[in-house]
């Protein structure tokens, strides 16, 4: 799992590459820590290269969403692969996380 | 410990080899140069001896020549007094030790009527001097070399040696001196005979080396003196060379006879001999022949002594090295024993005491440090192993508790049958299922907590307990889910969540009311064998947002229908290549379910199906399957 974060002011462009599963969920959470602490962040996460996420991955997206909201920021996931989009849909996370 | 393999033996042997090599090469070099030097010295020495002897001999010969020459005028003065001539020759013999006989041999008819006339004096066997005229017919000196050569050449002459048959059977040589008249004609020859015994004695007395041999050759190579007396006058050196088949001796003879002087090497039996040779004053030549083995005898002895001393020294050196190195490396042996003991688990193994401030002390300190570290680590390891064992045993207990929290008794009532199973990926897991039958109403639920292990298990038990409790309070199914969600969301700092599906079936009518909390769609198997995913409104996984209003939906199930509920441990089970089992395989499986297949059989078969798909891959998520059939 590779996480690339490009920052311009309060705009964050994040590119995720690979799978999120038990083996790397903790690392993924650490990689996103800067985003969780940023105020007024405007985050766009490019998920086009993300092949799979386990429920641990979902939990981290949920944490990120909650912390972004707490810091008056906004977050959007984009270019999700169908099988990943399906996971967000099934769990209802599509209802609380903006996906385009 | 075998000596041949020990460190000290190997090192000592190496030292011994190198030292021996040095010793041997030194001895060889010294020996080579000393041989060369001593060889040269020996030649010089022998030459000196020979020269001194030659001088001595020449002096004697010169003395004889002078004595004869000095008599010339006396003879000429007394030619008229023939009897006085006897006196003259007697005096010559008397006054010269070397001269044993002397004669004046006159030309034929010098005295009228005397064809031969030669007054002669000689020493007899008793040392008295006798005189006689040797000019008699039976001794015609005109045929004698001593007379003819001097007579014809008009020059003094030393004869070749000869046996004096008339006298004392001794080897003699004669010096002949011609006496000339006013016209320059020879009228008489004055002679002096000398015995060659003194020459032989003088020569044989020369012993520069133990087995030195001396020879004197006449002008034709005849032995005049020889260390083997019987060869004197009886043999020429050239005949001897032929006799022993040694051309080098022949060559030596040629060189000597030609009047050369020098040194010459040749074989002598098994030894190598060298000759120093040079001419004597009368045309003869002398040589001393010495054996190199004599020359080198003492240096050979010296070499032997050096070799013996060196060998003893080397042996002592070896013993000393061996003992010293053994003593120095003794601690290594003890370290090795200590290491072996440590390997067997005795970390208190005694270490050798090191008193030297060297590498051995460093080794000792390192060893000691290693002992302490190992003791420390092993203690830690024991503690943590014990701790792990405790954790493991606690986890096993937790697993039993968790598995006993989900119902494992499945009633076979008249209108439904149920079976479910829960297979955690680890000791404990985050999946759950539950069912309650109350007055022909079946409540059921299946859930999957995010993550695995103990955190998920704790969250699971709370969820399961809440469901059981709230259902029993008689709330509608959407209220049940909403309330559980509120309860879970209240204190959920870790943002755990649980996907949840709860349903309520009126077993008499088949009416099902259900509420989905973000869980996978269940499979609906119709009585005619068709199977499909039943899409339900996802709402939201539980524990995420408090106050979320969950909505319920309704469907009517026909008698003979089945529902198959599962967690994503089934659809997301992966093989070693990370291919997922997937919803398609699940649906295909569902279409193979037989009409009368028992719920437990279906569940077991699905488990087998998943296992045969994942093969050797490790189960990475909890698996829960629940199936309900309406009868």
Image (tube, coloured by chain):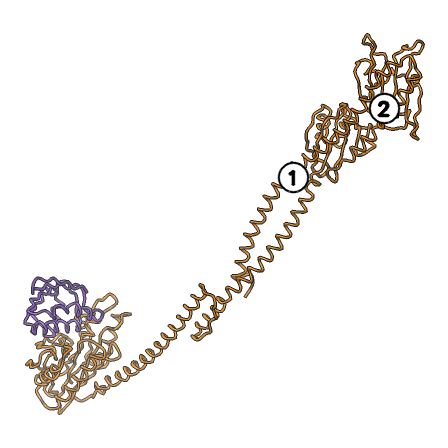
What residue is pinned by disc 2? Answer: B193
Q: Nearer the viewer, mark 1 or mark 2?
A: 2
Residue B439, image x, y percentages: 13, 92
Nearest the viewer among B237 and B364 is B364
Q: Which residue has dot 1 on it?
A: B38
Which image quadrant for residue B554? Answer: bottom left
Question: In front: B502, or A77?
Answer: A77
Tell me the colour chain B is drawn in: orange
**B390 lies above or below B275:** below
Give the x, y percent position of residue B380: 34, 77
**Whether residue B89 is situated above or below residue B619 in the rendered picture:** above
Quadrant of the rendering where the C terminus of chain A is positioned: bottom left
Question: Marks 1 and 2, Cα distance to the nearest angstrom?
Answer: 42 Å
Q: Which of A55 and B575 is in front in this view?
A: A55
Tell which residue pokes out farthest to the bottom in this image.
Answer: B439
Give the vertical position of B180 relative to B313 (above or below).
above
Q: Which chain carries label 1?
A: B
């Amino acid at each position: 799992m590779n996480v690339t974060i490009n920052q311009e002011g309060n705009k964050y462009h994040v590119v995720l590459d690979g799978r999120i599963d038990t083996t790397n969920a903790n690392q993924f959470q650490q990689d996103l820590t800067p985003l969780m602490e940023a105020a007024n962040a405007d985050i766009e996460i490019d998920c086009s290269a993300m092949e799979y996420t386990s429920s641990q991955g979902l939990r981290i997206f949920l944490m990120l969403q909650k912390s972004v909201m707490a810091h008056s920021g906004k977050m959007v996931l984009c270019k999700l692969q169908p099988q990943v989009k399906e996971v967000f849909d099934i769990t209802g996370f599509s209802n609380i996380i903006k996906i385009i | 410990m075998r000596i041949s393999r020990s460190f000290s033996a190997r090192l000592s042997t190496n030292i011994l080899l190198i030292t021996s090599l040095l010793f041997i090469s030194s001895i060889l070099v010294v020996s080579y140069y000393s041989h060369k030097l001593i060889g040269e010295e020996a030649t010089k020495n022998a030459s000196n001896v020979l020269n001194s002897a030659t001088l001595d001999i020449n002096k004697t010969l010169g003395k004889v020549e002078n004595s004869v020459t000095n008599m010339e005028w006396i003879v000429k003065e007394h030619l008229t007094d023939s009897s006085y001539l006897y006196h003259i020759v007697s005096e010559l013999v008397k006054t010269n030790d070397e001269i044993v006989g002397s004669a004046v041999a006159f030309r034929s008819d010098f005295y009228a009527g005397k064809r031969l006339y030669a007054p002669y004096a000689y020493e007899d066997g008793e040392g008295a001097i006798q005189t006689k005229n040797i000019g008699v017919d039976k001794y015609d000196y005109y045929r004698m070399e001593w007379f003819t050569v001097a007579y014809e050449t008009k020059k003094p002459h030393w004869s070749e040696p000869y046996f004096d048959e008339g006298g004392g059977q001794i080897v003699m040589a004669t010096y002949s001196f011609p006496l000339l008249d006013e016209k320059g004609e020879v009228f008489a020859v004055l002679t002096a005979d000398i015995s060659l015994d003194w020459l032989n004695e003088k020569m044989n007395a020369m012993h520069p080396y133990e087995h030195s041999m001396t020879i004197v050759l006449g002008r034709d190579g005849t032995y005049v003196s020889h260390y083997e007396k019987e060869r004197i006058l009886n043999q020429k050196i050239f005949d001897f060379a032929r006799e022993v088949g040694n051309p080098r001796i022949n060559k030596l003879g040629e060189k000597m006879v030609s009047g050369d002087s020098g040194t010459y090497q040749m074989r002598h039996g098994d030894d190598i001999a060298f000759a120093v040779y040079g001419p004597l004053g009368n045309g003869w030549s002398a040589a001393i022949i010495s054996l190199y083995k004599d020359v080198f005898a003492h240096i050979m002895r010296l070499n032997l002594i050096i070799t013996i001393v060196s060998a003893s020294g080397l042996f002592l050196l070896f013993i000393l090295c061996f003992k010293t190195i053994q003593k120095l490396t003794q601690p290594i042996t003890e370290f090795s024993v200590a290491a072996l003991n440590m390997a067997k688990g005795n970390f208190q193994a005694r270490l050798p005491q090191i008193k030297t401030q060297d590498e051995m002390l460093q080794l000792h300190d390192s060893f000691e440090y290693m002992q302490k570290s190992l003791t420390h680590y092993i203690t830690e390891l024991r503690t943590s192993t014990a701790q792990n064992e405790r954790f493991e045993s606690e986890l096993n207990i937790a697993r039993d508790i968790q598995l006993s929290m989900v119902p494992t008794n499945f009633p076979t009532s008249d209108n439904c049958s149920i079976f479910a199973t829960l297979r955690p990926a680890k000791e404990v897991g985050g999946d759950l299922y539950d069912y309650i039958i109350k007055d022909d109403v079946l409540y059921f639920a299946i859930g999957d907590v995010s993550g695995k292990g103990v955190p998920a298990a704790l969250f699971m038990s709370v969820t399961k307990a809440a469901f059981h409790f709230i259902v029993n309070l008689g709330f509608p199914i959407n209220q049940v889910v909403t309330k559980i969600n509120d309860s879970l969301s209240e204190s959920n700092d870790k943002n755990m969540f649980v996907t949840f599906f709860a349903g309520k079936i009126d077993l008499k009518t088949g009416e099902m009311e259900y509420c989905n909390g973000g869980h996978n769609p269940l499979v609906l198997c119709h009585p005619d064998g068709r199977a499909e995913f039943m899409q339900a409104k996802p709402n939201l996984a539980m524990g995420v947002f408090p106050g979320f209003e969950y909505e319920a939906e309704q469907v009517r199930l026909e008698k003979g229908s089945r529902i198959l509920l599962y967690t994503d441990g089934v659809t997301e089970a992966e093989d070693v290549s990370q291919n997922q089992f997937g919803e398609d395989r699940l649906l295909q499986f569902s279409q193979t379910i037989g009409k009368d297949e028992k719920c437990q059989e279906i569940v077991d078969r699905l488990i087998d199906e998943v296992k045969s798909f994942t093969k050797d891959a490790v189960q990475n998520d909890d698996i829960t399957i629940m199936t309900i059939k309406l009868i």
